[in-house]
Each structure stands twice: as C-alpha cells, then as structure tokens.
Amino acid sequence: MRVKKIIDKYLIESGLYNTDLEVDGYLIEGIERNESFWTNEEPKEIIKLEKTTRVISYGELTPEEYPEQLEKAKGNYSYDWNSDIKFDSLDDEFVYKKFLEEHKPVIEQYTKRTPIDFTVVEITGRTDNKFITPYRFLRKENHQVNDSLYEYIPEPMEMAREIANEYGFVEVEDGKETKGLYWSVPNHSKDTLRFLKINGLYSHSKLPQWRNEPKFAGISAGTWEECEKAYKVHVRLIDCVFKEAKTIYLAQGVGIDLAKVTEKLQYFTNLVGRIDAKSRSEVNPRTVQNLILEFKQELLNGIKDV
C-alpha cells in the first residue's frame, strides 16, 4: 500500500475492495474498489479488518484439546478406498459418533485484524496558492493518480475574508450592523455568497455581475494554469464588490456626491472629444484644463472639510 504526502496531508491509496480499514485506531468502513482517503497525520499503523468466523470450543473441550480427544474417540479404525473411516467394530463406531454428538463446534463471528505494510511517498508540486493543490482524487475510469495535475477547490467565504481584510472590512454576524466598513453572509449563502451584504446592502443590488448567483465552480483535475485562471476569475468577482463598496463609503464620508462626480467627468470627456489638435477647435484646451483644475480643488476642499 502507498501513502502520498501532499503538502501537509496524507493520501492513503488502499488498493483494496469491499473491506474495512483501521488507521491509527480510526475506523474507515465500506471501502470501494481502489478507493483513496485523506488523513491529517502521517499514519503509523494500518490494519485490514475482515469479518469472519472461528471455533471457540467443542463442548467442554478447547480447540487445542479437541484433536487429541478426537483421535482417542476413534478407537480402532482404518480408511477404506474412498478415504472414509472404517471401524473395526460397531462399539468403536458408536463411541466415535457419540463423541461427535457431545462435542459439536461452537462458532463465533469475529473481526480478523491483519497489519498492512505501507510506504510514504512525498509528492512535490507548486503550493503557493492554498486553494490549488496537487491532484488528490482517483479517476474512476483508470484508478490512477496523476501527480502532474492540480485541483482547485474554491472556498468563497475564505476568499471573501482575505479580500475584505485587504480593504479594511470587518466580518459581522448576519443581521448585525456596526460602524465603519463591515460585511456579512447568512449561513445558507456561504457556499455561493449569493446574499453577501456589505455595509448592510446586498451586493447583487449594486453590481450587474452579481445579479445572477455567482458560480464558484472548482476544477477537479487540471493544469496549474487552468486552476489559477479559474481562481483569478473568482477573486476578481469578489474583489470588485468590496472595491465598489469602499469607494462609495469613502465618497459618502467626505461629502462627495458620486453622481455629480460622474456627471462632471463625463462632461470633461465630451469636451476633450471635441478638441481637434490639427485645426482651430471651438473648445480651448486651456479652458478644459482650468475646469479640471477647478474640479480637483473642489474635491480637495470637500475632503479637508470632513
């Protein structure tokens, strides 16, 4: 049997079928064909468990005493051409059959414990992303582990915590509020973040990409690049909603009207679009420059007044 060490966990490849195992005292029941399973600690002892039967006595005789007494009960006998016992007299045959009748085997069911030899093999690979690890599970079609592949297992809540911390958000229980930047997710939505709330507002009401339930699909077996690409898509999806929420929060905190800012910027964009560098333009570039500088000063004054 082989045990693979992958990062800080151990993959036990049983190579067994329809049996039970005991790993360091922990029972693993109903192993299917070539099934593998994980443990957090390096196994010290693996025992195969088999349900079977054994004879515990023959009446008052122990299994060790029975063979000798059986020979005595046979008396004078020989074997015929068919290897059956042939007694010299009816009395000898009677004594033998009476012994068998009085000493029937008492059978009990028990679990046979067979220690299994195993080796531990360390699997190396890229491990700089905790959500992407070397390929763990067996492929059903060929029952083999490909050590060159990786699997990506997204954990939306953990990913959201990391991003929220970067933006300075504090996680609170769902339904509770606090001062400053905070976020929460109800228990029924922690796998999808569908009802992620930031500063008391649902994320799907703010951003188009969150109006449909976000899909955090993992990759069970792929290259590092494929797994990393899927990971980055999910990170961007979560990042954008926290980034947007912080932008709104900061703008409200300094008394800035975001709608007015957006309107002004669009006005400047339209003016710049009407400037023709090759001919005399109806819009004077210096006028546009002065307008932008004035608007910049308005924003600065708004921040200073807070």
Image: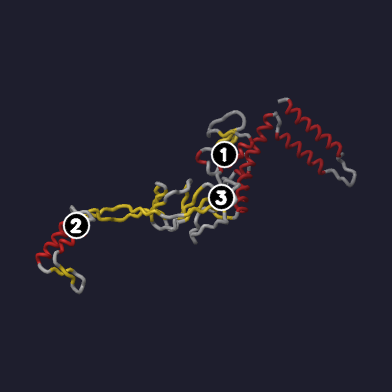
Could you tell me which residue is drawn at 79 percent across and 30 percent down? 297
- In the rendered view, tell whether residue 206 sits above or below residue 31: above
**Neighbour class for label 3 at 10 Å: few (<14), some, many (≥20)?**
many
Foreground disc of the pair 2, 3: 2
Dot placed on the residue nearer the N-terminal end, 2 or 1: 2
Cα distance, mark 2 to mark 3?
59 Å
Residue 155 showing in the rendered view: yes
Three-letter amino acid code at disc 3?
A: Thr
Instruction: Locate residue 267, reporting x and y percent.
Output: 78, 38
Pointer 1: what residue?
A: 196
Residue 215 showing in the rendered view: no
Foreground disc of the pair 2, 1: 2
Dot placed on the residue nearer the N-terminal end, 2 or 3: 2
User: Where is the C terminus found, in terms of image quarters?
Assistant: top right
Three-letter amino acid code at disc 2?
A: Lys
Could you tell me which residue is drawn at 67 percent across and 35 percent down? 247
Compare residues 171 and 68 and report the one nearer the observer.
Answer: 68
Three-letter amino acid code at disc 1?
A: Leu
For label 2, the SS is loop
Pointer 3: what residue?
A: 133
For label 3, the SS is strand
**Neighbour class for label 1 at 10 Å: few (<14), some, many (≥20)?**
many
User: Where is the N terminus found, in terms of image quarters?
Assistant: bottom left
Dot placed on the residue nearer the N-terminal end, 3 or 1: 3
Q: Are marks 2 and 1 in contact (CB under 8 Å)?
A: no
- In the rendered view, tell whether residue 160 sits above or below residue 6: above
Cα distance, mark 2 to mark 1?
71 Å
